[in-house]
Every structure is written in C-alpha cells, then in structure tokens.
Image (tube, rainbow, N blue to C red):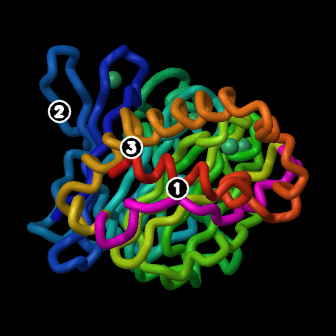
Amino acid sequence: MSCQCDFADVDHDGDDDLLHSSYGQSFSGLVMSRLFLNDGTGFFDEYNPSGQVSANPNLAAQTRAGFVEGTQQTNTTNTTGLFHDITNVSLDVDFADFDGDFDNDIQADSRDTQQRMFQNRWFENGESYGTETAQTRLYRDVTGSWLLGPNGLAEQPGANYDNDFHDMDNDSDVDGYFLGYIGTTDKWGVNDGSGHMQNFQTVPNSANDDNEIDWHDYDHDGDVDPFISAFSGADRFYKNQYVESASINLVQVSIGTGMGGEHARLRHGRHGQRRRHRHHLRRGRWGERSVASQRHQRSRPDRPARGSDPTIGSGQSELEAAPGHVARVGQRQL
Ligand SMILES: [Ca+2]
Ligand SMILES: [Ca+2]
Ligand SMILES: [Ca+2]
Ligand SMILES: [Ca+2]
C-alpha cells in the first residue's frame, strides 16, 4: 500500500530519518503515512508521540496517532495544529524547506484527493519535538494556507502521480511543478518565500496522463527546466524562460528521437521502478547530453551563443531553433 518513501534529517541530529507514505488499500486513501526517526546507528523508531495506534488498516477519524499535531480529520483546512489529515492517496512525498527556516517540511501528493503540506516545527518548538502536554509535535498540517491552489480544496486531480520542487525563479525558495493538478493537467506554482504556493499556472500541452517530473538546466542558462515522463504517449521537455523574460512561462521544446512515451513505459511501469528512471536521468543520460551539446556548440562558431537567440523570449525554444543539433544528440541516445 506504499509507493514512496523519502529520507531527510528532520530533527537536526545529523542522520537521515524516514517518511513512509501510504495510499491505502485499493487506493482508498484511508491508511496513515508514518515518520520514523533514525537512532544514529541505522535503526528507525516511529515518531508517534501520542502512543495511539491506528486501527488495521484504516485510520479512524479523531485519532491522535501519527507525527502531525492534532487529530485526524479528512480534508481539514485547519492550520492551528488542532487537526490533520495524514491519509491520502500518496504516491509521492518530498522533503523541502518551503518556509526558509532551515528545517525539512513535507509535501505529500495525492492521486485523487487534496494534496497535503506539513510544516516542520523544530524551531517553533524551541529546537525540540514539542510535547503532548503542550499539544505540540514536530509537524503541523498547513495545507489550508500553503497549498490551496487556484480553486481551494475543490481540486480533484485524479492523476497526481508526482510533484517536484525546485527554485524555478531564482529567488532562493522552492517552487513546485504539480503533475495532474486538475484532472490530468499539470500546473506550476511559485513560493511566496514563506511556504505558500501561489500564482498557479497551467503547463501548456500537459493534459496527457504523466508519471513523473524531474529537473535539469539542460541549456545551462541558469534556471531549472522540467522534464516530464509520460505513462503513455510522448515524454515532454519544457524550457523555463525566467532568465530570458523574468517570467517562468514554461514552453515545450523538442526532445529529439528515442525518448518517446512507449519507450519510457517499457522502462518503468506506473508504480514499480519509476525512481530508477529518475536516477538514470540525473546521473548520466541528460548530463551527458548537456556536455555533448556544449562541446558541439563551441566547435561551431557560426551558431549563435547560448541564450542569445532573440526568438526564445517570444516562445520559440533554443532546441527548436537548432533541429539538426537535436537530431544528432538524439541519435547518440540510441
Ligand atoms: Ca535525524
Ligand atoms: Ca522549514
Ligand atoms: Ca523560487
Ligand atoms: Ca534552463
């Protein structure tokens, strides 16, 4: 019933702790996600300060079990610590410091229901986990203020298989790309610097049923660009135009041959091995492509310098402007 775990040091003791997400039996979204603390020797103990235990398997309403302040209330928008919702159809979880206070907050996607945001309260609790007597814990559900989206909690994604976070506008806070944010359509949102995702924008040509997003500054212009792997159909690459136009304004660019959706689906099915594909992208395939691209450009003095193409800011990509170059790189992929 789990499709994703993630590691980060949530309590500033120098070891990586474990967040284990669940999507529930038959994607019910009724089983709790759980946090486990590393004891420094590689053994993990569940952080469950109330001592209450979930029923098997579904977490009942008003239960205090879990790592987040308050009691369980489905789809709560409370942000004071009275209630939380730690049961959703979570196929991806990510640690990031959304509010810029140097501790690891949590974003949990949900295939079919409201995504969640949990604020790490280490510093708010005086550099401690908090106490049950004070009704404080390490995490607080802040979905109601950090992730309401363009239409509040009415969003019903239906295909939210992955989100990922990176600084898309170079202002030193993490922004987000949300797969299948409404139906199967993707959106990106920007962080206001204190954790609130806002100004959600629809990603062009993103109605396909996608599987994963990851980042890479493929054109080395100083902003990160998203790559989307598709469940079916073609994968997509977008250019972030922030450096050129002071606006993210994602525009789809060609990715050449050899990276189509059928190819991707064969490599990594919907649930089983998606992270292996991500690892591959980070470590080699796209990095090698970028290096090759740079070398090729330096060897062609007649080609415009990177970032100097005036058509980029009006929506045409650098890759589109040099199709021959893309084709040669693509052949190298095969
Ligand atoms: Ca730790
Ligand atoms: Ca934080
Ligand atoms: Ca940012
Ligand atoms: Ca870029």
The stretch drawn in magenta includes residue 248? yes
Q: How far apart are marks 2 and 1 (CA)?
A: 51 Å
User: What's the mark number on residue 327?
Assistant: 1
Q: SS class of the residue under badge 1?
A: helix
Q: In this view, does 109 lie above or below 293?
A: below
Q: Is residue 321 above or below residue 120?
A: below
Q: Distance between the residues labelled 1 and 3?
A: 19 Å
Q: SS class of the residue under badge 3?
A: helix
The stretch drawn in magenta includes residue 173? no
The numbered mark, 2 or 1, whose residue comes first in the sequence reads: 2
Q: Which residue type does callout 2 highlight?
A: Asp
Question: Toward the viewer: 214 or 24?
Answer: 214
The residue at the point 45 percent across, 24 percent down is: 128
Q: Position of residue 22 (x, y in %)?
A: 24, 61
Q: SS class of the residue under badge 2?
A: strand
Q: Position of residue 164 (x, y in %)?
A: 50, 52
The residue at the point 59 percent across, 62 percent down is: 254
Please say if the residues under marks 1 and 3 sit with CB atoms less than 8 Å apart.
Answer: no
The numbered mark, 2 or 3, whose residue comes first in the sequence reads: 2
Q: In this view, does 217 lie above or below 241?
A: above
Decide if residue 105 is on the left or right side of residue 61: right
The residue at the point 66 percent across, 41 percent down is: 219
Residue assigned mark 2: 45
Q: Nearer the viewer, mark 2 or mark 3?
A: 3
